Image: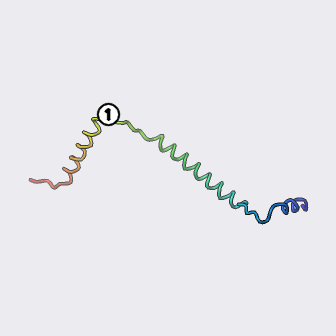
Amino acid sequence: MTHLVTLAKEVDEDKVTPGVLGFIVFAVMALAVWGLMKSMNRHMGRVDFDEAPDGAGEASGKGAAEQTSGKASPAKG
């Protein structure tokens, strides 16, 4: 046991090191990023996106705007 104590004294006492707490914080952050990436990949795999042709996108956008504005206005009778 005294042999380990002498090894610890050879380290420069003026040098600051992160220590065990720094390693634990880094490991927790790494696990959190890994979990978020895994979750993102699972969610992106569920996305079903079909891109509309160039001309159809503009026409459907205008039609959708007209439909929503028609629903918002009160019915006249």
Residue 44 as seen in the image, left or right of residue 56? right
Q: Residue at x 79, y 65 (%)?
A: 13
In which quarter of the view is residue 52 placed? top left
In which quarter of the view is residue 19 placed? bottom right
Quadrant that contains the N terminus: bottom right
Q: Residue furthest right?
A: 2
Q: Residue furthest left?
A: 77
Q: Residue at x 61, y 55 (%)?
A: 29
Give coordinates of residue 16: x percent, y percent. 73, 63
In which quarter of the view is residue 53 placed? top left
In this rendered view, identify the residue nearer to me: 21 or 12. Answer: 12
Q: Residue furthest top?
A: 53
In this rendered view, identify the residue nearer to me: 44 or 25. Answer: 25
Give coordinates of residue 74: x percent, y percent. 16, 55
Q: Amino acid at mark 1?
A: Pro
Count of numbered circles in the view: 1
Give coordinates of residue 24: x percent, y percent. 68, 58
Placement of 56 over or under 34, stated as above or below: above
Q: Residue at x 21, y 46 (%)?
A: 66
In this rendered view, identify the residue nearer to me: 44 or 19. Answer: 19
- Color scheme of the displayed model: rainbow
Mark 1 = which residue? 53
Q: Residue at x 25, y 45 (%)?
A: 64
Placement of 53 over or under 20, stated as above or below: above
Residue 11 as seen in the image, left or right of residue 48? right
Residue 12 as seen in the image, left or right of residue 22? right
Give coordinates of residue 9: x percent, y percent. 85, 63
Check disc 1 and report its element: helix, strand or loop: loop
